Image: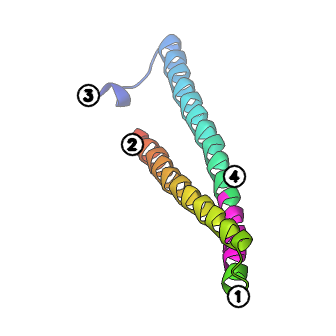
């Protein structure tokens, strides 16, 4: 018969069984707390990146609508494009890190 399903007859055995179960639950709670804090960090990063992308989109829209193609506007647009490319790289890095977190979390439960 499996040790998991054996009848526990002694008080010491039952106490040991309960302590083991408590340790397992504590470990699971710690993992969930860690995952929760990582998820909050991810949400914060997504929010910041979304704000930056929206701001850059507005600037690009203004630039497109503007008929003034002076050097100053061209330089600002190039700076925004560089910033947009940088943000795009950050988004890709974020997506990779998020997939790593998800893989680690789902891998722990498998």
Disc number placed over residue 44 in the picture, else none: 4
Is 38 within the magenta?
A: no
Disc number placed over residue 107 in the picture, else none: 2
- Give above or below for 19 relative to 41: above
**For the magenta stretch, what is the residue range?**
49-60
Q: Is mark 4 on a helix, strand or loop?
A: helix
19 vs 73, left or right, is: left
Q: Which of 71 and 91 is in front in this view?
A: 71
Q: Nearer the viewer, residue 92 or 13?
A: 92
Q: Which of marks 3 and 1 is in front?
A: 1
Q: Estimate the x, y position of residue 65 in percent, counting from the top left.
A: 70, 88
Disc number placed over residue 1 in the picture, else none: 3
Disc 3 to disc 4, how far (Cα)? 51 Å
Main SS category, magenta section: helix
> What colour scheme governs how the chains and residues are painted in the rendered image of this protein?
rainbow
> Quarter of the image holding residue 8?
top left
Q: What element carries label 3?
A: loop
Please tell me which residue is depicted at 56% across the width and 55% down the height of the picture.
86
Q: Earlier in the sequence, mark 2 or mark 4?
A: 4
């Amino acid at each position: 018969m499996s040790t998991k399903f054996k009848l526990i007859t002694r008080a010491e055995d039952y106490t040991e069984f309960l302590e083991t179960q408590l340790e397992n639950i504590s470990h699971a709670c710690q993992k969930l707390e860690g995952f929760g804090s990582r998820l909050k960090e991810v949400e914060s990063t997504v929010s910041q990146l979304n704000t930056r992308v929206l701001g850059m989109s507005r600037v690009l829209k203004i630039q497109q609508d503007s008929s003034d193609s002076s050097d100053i506007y061209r330089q600002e647009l190039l700076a925004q494009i560089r910033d947009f490319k940088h943000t795009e790289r950050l988004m890709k890095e974020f997506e990779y890190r998020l997939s790593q977190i998800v893989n680690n979390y789902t891998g722990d439960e498998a």
